[in-house]
Image (cartoon, rainbow, N blue to C red):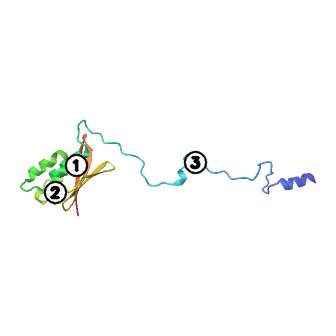
């Protein structure tokens, strides 16, 4: 009788005796190699683009953007050839080709009105110049060891 009573009291109901586990049985907690995997993807890109490789003595993005923007401004009496010659040192070949038929008299502004703002945007740097009537927006990228203006946009105020 003692054996039957002991077996009844110590049996946990699933056929396992109390000797199989001490105290209540707890299901194991799943683990993973990454303790933060349960948090999910926050969508933030964590890789950082490497710094562009500039040739020794090459001008920085700010200098190139400023030279280009000043050369791009509308100047009375300047020919298309003279205007494009002023842009050429800092412009990409593709950008110069896109400006081949542009009349410099059609440039929408003659005056930069405030300080430039530079912003890294992936592999490209964006320079914005407030100007009379809008904003000059230049895209710059390192090519051949130097910064070049690869895109030009005008945002009307």
Residue 33 falls in image quadrant: top right
Which is more foreground, mark 1 or mark 3? 1
Q: Distance of mark 1 from mark 3, alpha carbons?
A: 49 Å
Residue 9 relative to residue 149: left or right: right
Q: Residues within 10 Å of mark 2 (few under 14, many from 20)?
A: some
Residue 153 relative to residue 29: left or right: left
Residue 32, numbered circle: 3
Residue at the limit of the structure toward the top, as seen here? 56
| Mark nearer the N terminus (1 vs 3) | 3
Q: Distance of mark 3 from mark 2, alpha carbons?
A: 60 Å
- Viewer-closest of 106 and 95: 106
Residue named by callout 1? 65
Residue 103 appears in the figure = no
Residue named by callout 2? 111
| Mark nearer the N terminus (3 vs 2) | 3
- Judging from the image, what secondary structure is the residue with disc 3 in? loop
Residue at the limit of the structure toward the left, as seen here? 77
| Mark nearer the N terminus (1 vs 2) | 1
Q: Distance of mark 1 from mark 2, alpha carbons?
A: 15 Å
Q: Residues within 10 Å of mark 3 (few under 14, many from 20)?
A: few
Q: Are marks 3 and 2 in contact (CB under 8 Å)?
A: no
Which residue is drawn at the image coordinates 41% and 46% (left, top)? 47
- Viewer-closest of 3 and 126: 126
Report x, y in % for residue 58: 23, 39
Q: How many marks?
A: 3
Which residue is drawn at the image coordinates 30% and 49% (left, top)? 124
Q: Residues within 10 Å of mark 1 (few under 14, many from 20)?
A: many
Which is more foreground, mark 3 or mark 2? 2
């Amino acid at each position: 009788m003692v054996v039957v009573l002991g077996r009844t009291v110590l049996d946990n109901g699933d056929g396992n005796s109390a000797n199989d586990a001490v105290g209540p049985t707890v299901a194991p907690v799943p683990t993973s190699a990454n303790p933060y995997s349960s948090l999910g993807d926050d969508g933030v890109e964590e890789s950082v683009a490497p710094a562009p490789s500039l040739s020794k003595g090459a001008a920085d993005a700010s200098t190139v953007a400023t030279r280009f923007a000043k050369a791009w401004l509308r100047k009375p009496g300047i020919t298309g050839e003279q205007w494009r010659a002023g842009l050429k040192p800092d412009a990409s070949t593709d950008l110069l080709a896109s400006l081949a038929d542009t009349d410099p008299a059609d440039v929408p502004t003659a005056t930069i009105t405030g300080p430039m703002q530079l912003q890294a945007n992936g592999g490209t740097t964006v320079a914005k110049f407030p100007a009379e009537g809008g904003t000059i927006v230049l895209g710059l990228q390192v090519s051949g060891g130097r910064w070049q203006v690869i895109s030009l946009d005008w945002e009307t105020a």
